Image: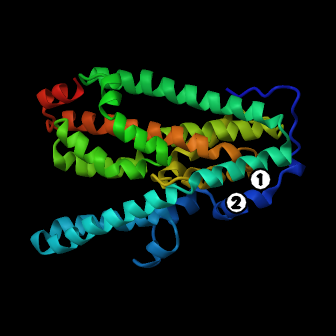
Amino acid sequence: MMLTLPNNLDFNPATLNGEAVAGYVGEAEHASISAFLLDIIPTTLISALTEGSILQVLFVAVLFGVSIALVGEPAEPVVEFIDRLSVVVFRLVALLMRLAPVGAFAAMAFTIGHYGLGVLANLAGLLATFYLTSLLFVLLVLGAIARANGFSILRLIAYLKSELLLVLGTSSSEAALPPLIGRLEAAGCAPGVVGLVVPLGYSFNLDGTNIYMTLAALFIAQACGVDLSLGEQIMLLSVAIISSKGAAGVTGAGFITLAATLAVVPSVPVAGMALILGIDRFMSECRALTNFVGNAVATIVIARWEGELDKDMLDRALR
């Protein structure tokens, strides 16, 4: 289903300012499914940390974590060092997030200045559609999963309200990772399950990012007058599901993966991302919240499946 734009606005793809999103387009120039999969493997161990590929970092991190687990006690000093380093990194992220509103309003000013005030109505429609879709997904889809596993999604949201406010303030679920782990353990989930599922979910269980990329891609296509066939829409959805795995918990990463997703359908101009540049910050908040709730639900469900959930502790916590 395509989003409907008011008839009083017509975007001409030739007038799109590609320079505004040149950095994101550059990230997606070589994007294809085969290139995406091959890019997961880094050239060297260190190159994964210097080339800016999130999936390469994740790949090395998984191998490194498995190696630490196999080594056992001799690796404990390494684990302690990483724990202390993560505290510093989280504080660094918190400092940078304080400047994010400045960038968000600058992007909005660019969009209004280039396309006029009329574009706000269309962008507001996209925002409303995205927030409503995410809300329905959380309440209906995740709510049904939660009910089937013996807990209420609304009570879980109330239990995690402090962490959700932190995610809302930073537009990234990354800042709430440590408190989420503590809250889930306090709710009866075994530490081993929480320690495995939550970090993996931050890279692989990105429900909000998937919703964002499909809606944004369809909005850009219709705004530029591109009529996507059903096959192209299915292709966009399939690639979005795969490419979103590189959008781990960092504000703005979804914008880069959106560029990679649009690149697989040549008829949709990647430069059309300039249309939503001004509201990406506001969409980032919603997708981060959706991702966060999805990871919390997934952790409780998997803990129950594995018999590692203390149901009495969960009930007391959610009450």
- In percent of the image, x 41 and y 52: which residue is there? 174
Q: Is disc 1 placed on a helix, strand or loop?
A: helix
Q: Is residue 92 above or below residue 163?
A: below
Q: Quadrant of the N terminus?
A: top right
- In percent of the image, x 83 and y 34: which residue is there? 118
Horizontal and vertical percent position of residue 148: 28, 21
* Residue contact at pointers 1 and 2, CB within 8 angstroms: yes
Quadrant in which residue 141 is drawn: top left
Q: Quadrant of the C terminus?
A: top left
- In percent of the image, x 36 and y 21: which residue is there? 144
Q: Is residue 83 above or below residue 229?
A: below
Which residue is the site of mark 1?
A: 271
Q: Earlier in the sequence, mark 1 or mark 2?
A: 2
Horizontal and vertical percent position of residue 219: 72, 36
Q: Is disc 2 placed on a helix, strand or loop?
A: helix
Q: Is residue 216 above or below residue 38?
A: above
Which residue is the site of mark 2?
A: 25
Q: Amino acid at mark 1?
A: Ala
Residues packed near mark 1 inside 10 Å, few (<14), some (14 to 19) or many (20 plus): many
